[in-house]
DNA sequence: AATTTCACG
DNA sequence: ACGTACGTGAAATTA
C-alpha cells in the first residue's frame, strides 16, 4: 500500500501540446475516412454504431452469406470478425481504420490532457490492489496500464509521457517472458527448463520441438504459430481458440496441440494435476500460496466447468508473475528510500516498471532495478529483466 | 444499465 | 450439441 500510494501521489508528466497536435490530425483523418465509408455505403450513417455498421455490411452490401451474430442477436462487427472479411469489400478496412482513430482520439488524446492535476501538473492514476482475481494490480481514473503502443498513431500517444524535467529520463524495466518461465517452474517440464537455461528464443525453441526441425531452420510462420501456442498454454489452450487465433482448421490446431504435449509432457501432466487438485480443494495457488477459489470447477455444465478449468491453469501463472513484481516493487521502493536518491517509481504495467531517473543516477539505477527485479522470486530458470531509457515512454522501451 | 468494441499485459 | 483461449478499464451506443 505505501508503495502504490507513493506512485499515485508522484504522478507522471504529460506533454499536452503533443496531444493537441495529434488530436487535430486525427480529427482530419477521421472525417476523411468517415466520408469514404459513407461513400461506399451510399448514405450517411453513424459509423460509431455497431448496429448501423452491421446493417450496412450485411443487409445492404451483403458482403457475406451468414454473418456472425452477438449473443443478443445483433450482427457482430468486432475486429476479429471484420479482419477476416477485409477482402470482401474495401469498406471493411476503412471501418477498422475509423475505429482505431476514434478509439485513440476519444479514449486517450482528448481525455488525458484534461486530467493534468492543477497543483502538481501531472497525471495521477489509482492502482487497485483488490480488483483483479489473479492478484494483478489494475489502474483506473485514468487507466495508465493500457496506453497504446501497437500502432503508429498509438505510439505517438506514448511519446507524450515524458520525464519530470530536463535532467531526468524515463526508465523502463520489464520481465522477459515471465509467464512462460513461471510455467517452467510450476511444471518442471524438462524441455521447457532446458529451453530457458540455454537462453534460446523460447518461441523458436518451441517451434523447433513441435515441428521437429533444428532451431536454426525454424521459419517465421512456424515461430509465429509456436508463439500463439505458448500463449494458448498460458490461457488454458483449446483447439478452437488456437484455430481462431492462427486462422487454421480446428483439426490442424488439434494436431499441433497434441504434438506440443508429446514434446512437453511435463506441461501436460502439470495441467492435468492442477485441474484435479482444484476439483478436490476448490482452489488453486500461486508460487507464494495466494489462492483463487474456483467455485465452478465441479459444475455439471461443461461450458461453465471449462471456464473454471482454464482459470485453474491461468491463475497460478498470471498470479505468480503478479506476486513476483509486487515483491520487487516493495524491495525497490525500500532500497530507493535508503539510498536517498532522486529516482521515483511511477507506474507498473504487469511485467514492467517505469521510473523517473535523474541522468546522474542512470548507471546506478540500471544495476539496482534490474537486480531487484531478477532476485525478487528466484526460479529454477533465469529471471531476466530488460531495461531501457529515453526522453519519453516509447523510447524507454 | 447493458452491450459492444477495443486499448493494454 | 454446446460455446470456448487469461486478466483488466473506458467510451459510445443501445435498450
Image (cartoon, coloured by chain):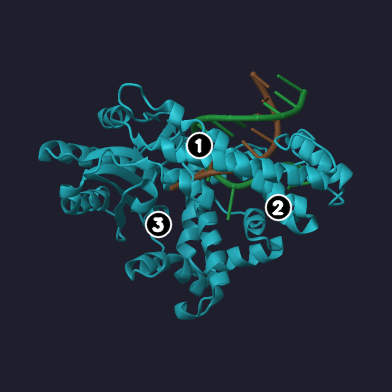
Chain colours: A cyan, B brown, C green
Question: Dot 2 corresponds to which residue?
Answer: A93
* Residue A97 visible within the image: yes
Question: Dot 3 corresponds to which residue?
Answer: A177
Along the line of sight, the residue nearer the viewer: A119 or A78: A119
Between disc 3 and disc 2, whose residue precedes?
A: 2
Mark 2 falls on what kind of element? helix
Residue A103 percent coordinates (x, y): 59, 39
Q: Is A207 placed left or right of A285 in the picture?
A: right
Foreground tag (3 vs 2): 2
Residue A142 percent coordinates (x, y): 45, 30
Chain designation of label 1: A
Residue at screen point 75% across, 38% down: A70
Labels 1 and 3 share a subunit = yes
Residue at screen point 79% across, 55% down: A89
Mark 3 Cα within 10 Å, few/some/many (few <14, many 20+)?
some
* Number of numbered discs visible in the structure rendering: 3
Q: Residue furthest left?
A: A339
Foreground tag (1 vs 3): 1
Chain designation of label 3: A
Residue A311 percent coordinates (x, y): 52, 42
Mark 1 near mark 2, Cβ–Cβ under 8 Å?
A: no
Mark 2 Cα within 10 Å, few/some/many (few <14, many 20+)?
some
Labels 3 and 2 share a subunit = yes
Question: Dot 1 corresponds to which residue?
Answer: A109
Residue at screen point 52% across, 32% down: A110
Q: Is A9 placed left or right of A129 in the picture?
A: left
Task: Report the Cα–Cα distance between label 1 and label 3.
Answer: 30 Å
* Residue A276 visible within the image: no
The answer to whether residue A174 is above or below residue A113 is below
Task: Report the Cα–Cα distance between label 1 and label 2.
Answer: 23 Å
Amino acid at each position: 500500500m505505501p508503495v502504490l500510494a507513493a506512485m499515485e501521489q508522484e504522478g507522471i508528466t504529460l506533454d499536452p501540446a503533443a496531444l493537441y497536435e495529434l488530436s487535430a490530425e486525427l480529427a482530419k483523418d477521421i472525417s476523411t475516412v468517415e466520408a469514404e465509408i459513407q461513400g461506399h455505403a451510399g448514405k450517411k450513417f453513424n459509423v460509431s454504431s455497431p448496429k448501423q455498421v452491421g446493417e450496412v455490411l450485411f443487409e445492404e452490401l451483403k458482403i457475406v452469406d451468414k454473418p456472425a451474430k452477438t449473443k443478443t442477436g445483433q450482427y457482430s462487427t468486432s475486429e476479429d470478425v471484420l479482419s477476416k472479411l477485409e477482402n470482401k469489400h474495401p469498406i471493411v478496412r476503412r471501418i477498422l481504420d475509423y475505429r482505431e482513430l476514434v478509439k485513440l482520439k476519444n479514449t486517450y488524446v482528448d481525455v488525458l490532457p484534461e486530467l493534468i492535476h492543477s497543483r502538481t501538473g501531472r497525471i495521477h492514476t489509482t492502482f487497485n490492489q483488490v480488483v483483479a482475481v489473479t492478484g494483478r494490480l489494475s489502474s483506473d481514473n485514468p487507466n495508465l496500464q493500457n496506453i497504446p503502443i501497437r500502432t503508429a498513431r498509438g505510439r505517438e500517444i506514448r511519446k507524450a509521457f515524458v520525464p519530470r524535467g530536463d535532467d531526468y529520463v524515463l526508465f523502463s524495466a520489464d520481465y522477459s517472458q515471465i509467464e512462460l518461465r513461471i510455467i517452467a517452474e510450476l511444471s518442471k517440464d524438462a524441455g521447457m527448463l532446458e529451453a530457458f537455461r540455454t537462453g534460446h528464443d523460447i518461441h523458436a525453441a518451441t517451434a523447433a520441438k513441435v515441428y521437429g526441425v533444428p532451431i536454426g531452420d525454424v521459419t517465421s510462420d512456424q515461430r509465429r504459430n509456436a508463439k500463439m501456442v505458448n500463449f494458448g498454454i498460458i490461457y488454458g489452450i483449446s483447439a478452437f481458440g488456437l484455430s481462431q487465433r492462427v486462422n487454421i482448421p480446428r483439426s490442424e490446431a488439434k494436431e499441433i496441440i497434441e504434438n506440443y504435449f508429446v514434446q512437453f509432457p511435463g506441461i501436460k501432466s502439470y495441467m492435468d494435476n492442477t485441474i484435479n487438485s482444484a476439483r478436490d480443494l476448490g482452489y488453486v495457488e500461486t508460487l507464494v500460496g495466494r489462492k483463487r477459489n474456483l467455485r465452478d470447477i465441479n459444475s455439471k455444465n461443461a461450458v461453465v466447468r471449462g471456464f473454471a478449468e482454464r482459470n485453474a491453469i491461468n491463475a497460478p501463472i498470471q498470479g505468480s508473475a503478479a506476486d513476483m513484481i509486487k515483491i520487487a516493487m516493495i524491495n525497490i521502493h525500500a532500497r530507493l528510500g535508503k539510498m536517498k536518491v532522486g529516482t521515483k517509481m511511477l507506474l507498473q504495467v504487469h511485467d514492467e516498471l517505469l521510473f523517473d531517473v535523474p541522468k546522474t543516477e542512470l548507471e546506478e539505477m540500471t544495476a539496482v532495478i534490474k537486480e531487484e527485479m531478477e532476485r525478487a522470486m528466484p526460479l529454477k530458470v533465469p529471471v531476466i529483466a530488460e531495461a531501457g531509457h529515453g526522453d519519453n515512454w516509447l523510447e524507454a522501451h
